Image (tube, rainbow, N blue to C red):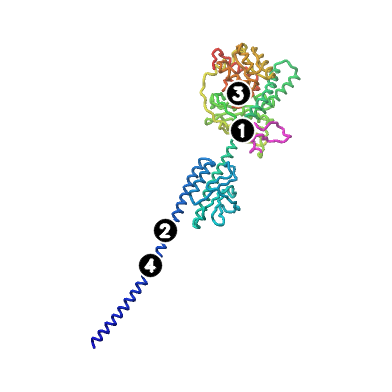
């Protein structure tokens, strides 16, 4: 009985173990299947991940290539203009950055010789309707257009045709990178247009400046030449025996001529200043002598008007200074002349001092004063307190403008205070350098006192009126002279005659004074040659010096100026050399 139970228990145990084994086998088989499918899933995921990594790597390579291309050409286009060669090479390099079939650059700007530049396979580029954005895809995403823009204005396009549509994940990157390329090209085109415009403006300005210089030189000559005859004849006539009636007429001619000379000088000075042609002539001068000259110029005129004129000079004023004495004199003549013009009673006072390396002039008067509403524009050209046709005082309105520009050219300052019906006070401050005194004064005295009636003069002048006036002036000094109508005739005369000094007109037909002087100097001619010229611009003065002329007499010149020049260059003539 016990054995049967034992056997029964063993059978049940075996059944349980068999059942457990089958369950284990079934579970193992199920897990193995799961593991197999998990393995397949992992393998599939690895394939997808590998493929994605390859795509990401390609995208990274694409971005790096474009960024490298952008950096290279951005640097290059900052140094060189966007020529067809540079832009064409850029398109060729862009072909290597993606699977691109063809690229085309089109521009409406006048930068490249050809309106279209193309790279890649020959193909047809369809026109896209212009969108509001700066890029546009076609429907199947195989073509992309990015636009060249100046602000909101579209001025060109880059058209890309791909072999196949780029992956959707690439679209945003492609749009961004190619828009940067388009922006770079747009910027280079804009810089080139600005440069072209600047060059054109520079050329236009240079042409305008040259035209202005030529006009100033021409009008200078054309106005001063007849004025030389007019004032020269009036000056010579003053020494003749004439009736009181003729003397009044002559005085009117002389005054009108002097007024015309002032106007011409003002107009030419303002023209030269605007053209940048006015230059200062620095030389040693005596402030005291300058002030004495100013006093002599105005004392009789002011006295005739019933006014008092006083000049006060501080003891601190240096004996000699370095500056353009003629231009300083011009400033004072303009300012004091205005005081005389606008003062009917009372006085005019000139006070001169030296403060902190600057020469100070204060010109005060008891005239009509300047209205408050006119003071701001007082130094503007062609401006007067009263510009109406019924104004009491004549003038061009250039005097104060010229004064201000001359003062600024000397790095100085000008200011004024004025009270209506009480008077005006102008203050001029001119920074000047101290000059070293020399022994030239003795030489100048000798030059100014020796006789010149022994001189033999060759006067080269083409205008008969000027010949007549110059001849009559030379007759005053009992000088032996001969005329030549142009440089060619002058050279013929010099072959057989000796002269002490040549007076040389600059502008003449056939052979002008510059060419004649250059020829003479090349041939070893060493005698003084003095220019007789209506030209006062720095260019013409420089041309006189460069050609070999020793001095210049500006038309219209006076008898005393001619005498001074002849005395200066005839003194010690036997020791003279170029």
SS for dot 3: helix
The answer to whether residue 512 is visible is yes
The CA distance from mark 3 to mark 2 is: 103 Å
Q: Are marks 1 and 3 in contact (CB under 8 Å)?
A: no
Residue to which mark 4 is pinned: 36
Q: Residue at x 73, y 19 (%)?
A: 247
SS for dot 4: helix
State the image coordinates of residue 495 (x, y, percent, origin top left).
60, 12
Res. 6 image quadrant: bottom left
Which of pointers 3 and 4 indicates the residue nearer the eye?
4
- Magenta residues (range): 374-400
Residue to which mark 2 is pinned: 50
Q: Is residue 126 above or below residue 445?
A: below
Residue to which mark 3 is pinned: 292
The residue at the far bottom in this view is: 1
State the image coordinates of residue 560 (x, y, percent, origin top left).
63, 18
- Name which of mark 4 and mark 1 comes first in the sequence: 4
Residue to which mark 1 is pinned: 207
């Amino acid at each position: 009985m016990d054995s049967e139970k034992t056997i029964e228990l063993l059978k049940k145990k075996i059944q349980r173990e068999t059942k457990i084994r089958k369950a284990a086998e079934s579970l193992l088989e199920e897990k193995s299947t799961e593991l197999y499918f998990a393995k397949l899933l992992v393998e599939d995921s690895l394939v997808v991940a590998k493929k994605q990594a390859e795509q990401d790597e390609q995208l990274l390579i694409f971005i790096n290539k474009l960024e490298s291309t952008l950096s290279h050409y951005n640097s290059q286009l900052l140094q060189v203009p966007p020529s067809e060669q540079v832009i064409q090479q850029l398109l060729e390099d862009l072909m290597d950055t993606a699977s691109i079939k063809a690229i085309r650059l089109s521009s409406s700007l006048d930068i490249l010789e050809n309106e279209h530049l193309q790279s890649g396979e020959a193909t047809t580029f369809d026109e896209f309707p212009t969108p509001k954005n700066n890029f546009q895809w076609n429907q199947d995403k195989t073509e992309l257009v990015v636009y060249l823009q100046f602000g909101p204005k579209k001025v060109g396009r880059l058209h890309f045709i791909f072999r196949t549509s780029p992956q959707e994940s690439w679209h945003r990157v492609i749009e961004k990178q190619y828009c940067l390329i388009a922006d770079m090209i747009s910027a280079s085109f804009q810089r080139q247009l600005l440069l072209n415009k600047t060059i054109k403006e520079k050329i236009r300005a240079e042409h305008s400046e040259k035209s202005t210089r030529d006009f100033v030189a021409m009008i200078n000559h054309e106005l001063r030449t007849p004025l030389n005859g007019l004032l020269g004849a009036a000056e010579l006539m003053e020494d003749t025996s004439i009736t009181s009636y003729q003397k009044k007429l002559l005085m009117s001619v002389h005054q009108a001529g002097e007024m015309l000379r002032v106007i011409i000088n003002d107009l030419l000075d303002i023209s030269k200043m605007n053209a940048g042609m006015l230059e200062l002539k620095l030389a040693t001068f005596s402030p005291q002598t300058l002030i004495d000259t100013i006093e002599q110029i105005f004392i009789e005129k002011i006295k005739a008007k019933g006014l008092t004129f006083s000049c006060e000079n501080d003891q601190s004023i240096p004996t000699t200074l370095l500056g353009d004495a003629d231009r300083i004199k011009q400033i004072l003549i303009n300012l004091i002349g205005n005081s005389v013009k606008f003062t009917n009673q009372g006085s005019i006072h000139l006070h001169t001092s030296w403060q902190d390396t600057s020469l100070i002039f204060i010109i005060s008067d008891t005239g009509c004063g300047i209205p408050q509403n006119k003071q701001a524009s007082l130094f503007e050209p062609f401006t007067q307190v009263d510009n109406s046709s019924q104004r009491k005082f004549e003038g061009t309105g250039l005097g104060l403008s010229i004064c201000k520009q001359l003062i600024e050219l000397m790095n100085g300052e000008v200011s004024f205070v004025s009270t209506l019906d009480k008077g005006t006070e102008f203050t001029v401050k001119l920074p000047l350098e101290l000059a070293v005194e020399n022994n030239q004064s003795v030489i100048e005295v000798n030059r100014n006192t020796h006789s010149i009636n022994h001189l033999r003069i060759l006067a080269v002048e083409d205008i008969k009126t000027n010949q007549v006036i110059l001849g009559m002036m030379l007759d005053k000094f009992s000088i032996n002279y001969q005329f030549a109508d142009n440089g060619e005739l002058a050279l013929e005369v010099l072959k057989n005659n000796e002269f002490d000094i040549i007076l040389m007109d600059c502008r003449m037909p056939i052979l002008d004074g510059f060419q004649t002087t250059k020829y003479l100097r090349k041939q070893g001619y060493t005698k003084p040659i003095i220019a007789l010229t209506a030209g006062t611009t720095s260019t013409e003065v420089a041309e006189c010096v460069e050609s070999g002329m020793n001095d210049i007499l500006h038309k219209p010149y006076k008898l005393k100026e001619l005498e001074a020049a002849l005395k200066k260059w005839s003194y010690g003539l036997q020791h003279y050399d170029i």
